[in-house]
Amino acid sequence: MKIVERIKKGLIGIGAFLLTIPTKVFAIDYMDIQPMYGIQEPELVRSNLVNSIWNICRMFIIPIALLIGIIIYLKKSKSSKKRKIITVLITISIVVILCLLVNYIINNVI
C-alpha cells in the first residue's frame, strides 16, 4: 500500500507542477498582457453601478413583475379572452420596446 500511496502522491505533485508552469515558472499572467510598443487604447469607463443595476433588472425584476402582472390580470379581468390576449401582447411588446430603448441609452449615451 505504501507504493500505491507514493505513486499517487508523485502523480499529484507532477500534475500540480504542470498546472502551475504557465503562471509560476514562466511568470505569465494571461489576463494582464500589455503591448510593448505603440499607442495603447484607453479603457472606456462607464458607470458600473448603472450597468449592474440594469443587468439585474433586465434579467430578474422586469420579467418577474411582468409575469405576475399578467397572471393577476388574466385571473381578475372580466373581459373576453380575445381582449385579454390582445392586451397581454400589447403590454409585452411595450415592455420589450422600453427595455431595448433603455439598453440603447445606457450603452451608447451614458
Image: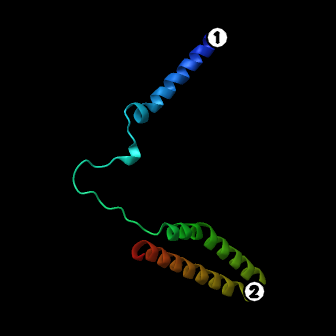
Give me the C-alpha separation between circle 2 and circle 1: 76 Å
Residue nearest the viewer, comparing 26 with 7: 26
| Quarter containing the N terminus | top right
The correct choice, above or below, for 106 with respect to 30 in the image is below
User: What residue sits 78% from the left and 84% below the top?
Assistant: 76
State which quadrant residue 84 falls in: bottom right
Rendering coords of residue 17 (x, y %): 47, 27
Q: Nearer the viewer's eye, disc 2 or disc 1?
A: 1
Q: Would you call the spot at circle 1 few (<14 residues within 10 Å), some (14-19), or many (20 or more)?
A: few
* Residue situated furthest bottom in the rendering: 79
Residue nearest the viewer, comparing 35 with 89: 35
Circle 1 sits on which residue? 2
Circle 2 sits on which residue? 77
Q: Earlier in the sequence, mark 2 or mark 1?
A: 1
Q: Would you call the spot at circle 2 few (<14 residues within 10 Å), some (14-19), or many (20 or more)?
A: few
The correct choice, above or below, for 75 with respect to 16 in the image is below
Amino acid type for the residue under numbered disc 1:
Lys
Rendering coords of residue 24 (x, y %): 43, 33
Q: Secondary structure at mark 1?
A: helix
Amino acid type for the residue under numbered disc 2:
Ser
